[in-house]
Image (cartoon, rainbow, N blue to C red):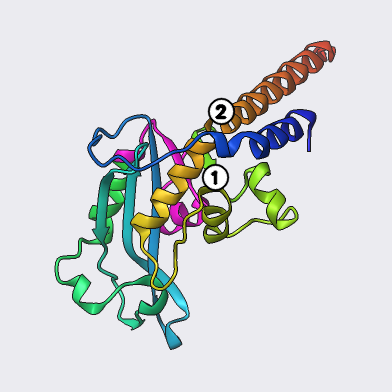
Amino acid sequence: MGADDKTARKDALKTWSNRPVEIDETKTAIGKYVSLDCEFVGVGHEGKRSVLARVSIVNYYGAVVMDEFVRPEEKVTDWRTWVSGIRPSDMQNAKSFKEVQYKVADILKDRVLVGHAVSNDLKVLLIAHPKRLIRDTSKHAAFRKISKGRAPSLKKLAKEFLGIDIQGDEHSSVEDARACILLFRQFKDDFQRLEQARESRGFLKKAKSAKEKALVPAIEEA
């Protein structure tokens, strides 16, 4: 971990409680930042394989931008209701995977995506998103400190830094997406500072590589 990362982590842990954040459902414009979360059900033998069943996206203020149930293309063998919150009745008006996928991709385009281990959600959605536009709460240095360097659970982060209880029973992808955006807003300056530091290191690395290539003498053809 570099000096910039360590400084940002210390500053974040010291000042987070002085910057309260809250949901404001009246601010419905999508804006620059969105938070995404998904719920899954099981298919195949004993329902061990996960497929998408619900996608929720909220904006910077926590207002719902999208909340769609997704109709699995395979027979569901385990609804996992106790954790997913998904029931067979939710599929009555569910959208197809392709329809939801295109809608999500359109919303995410050119926006900063916030999420918890969000690469897993993107993988299931079969959507790519630029790394520079991702803010992952499971990887933020200040948050990992409470789990001794490991990825902390979203439930633990919400309790520790927001003082709220989530995932008490069945999960809600809207609730989880809102928890992520609240965490991001609480530490927005720190997320941005770390991202700028990473971009600077990447720029310097590219500049150094270009300089080294320029110093290599060209081999003339005979």
Tell me where the magenta segment starts and ends, as one range.
Answer: 107-131
Q: Quadrant of residue 208?
A: top right
Where disc 1 sits, the SS reads strand
Label 1 Cα crowd, 10 Å radius (few <14 / some 14-19 / many 20+): some
Residue 131: x percent and y percent? 54, 37
Which label was assigned to residue 136? 1
Q: Is residue 221 above or below residue 130?
A: above
- Side of 152 where 158 appears, left or right: left
Does residue 113 belong to the magenta stretch? yes
**Contact? badges 1 and 2 (CB < 8 Å):** no
From the image, state whether disc 1 or disc 2 is nearer to you: 2
Residue at the front extreme, as displayed? 18
Residue of label 2: 189
Q: Quadrant of residue 70?
A: bottom left
Residue at the left extreme, as displayed? 93
Label 2 Cα crowd, 10 Å radius (few <14 / some 14-19 / many 20+): some
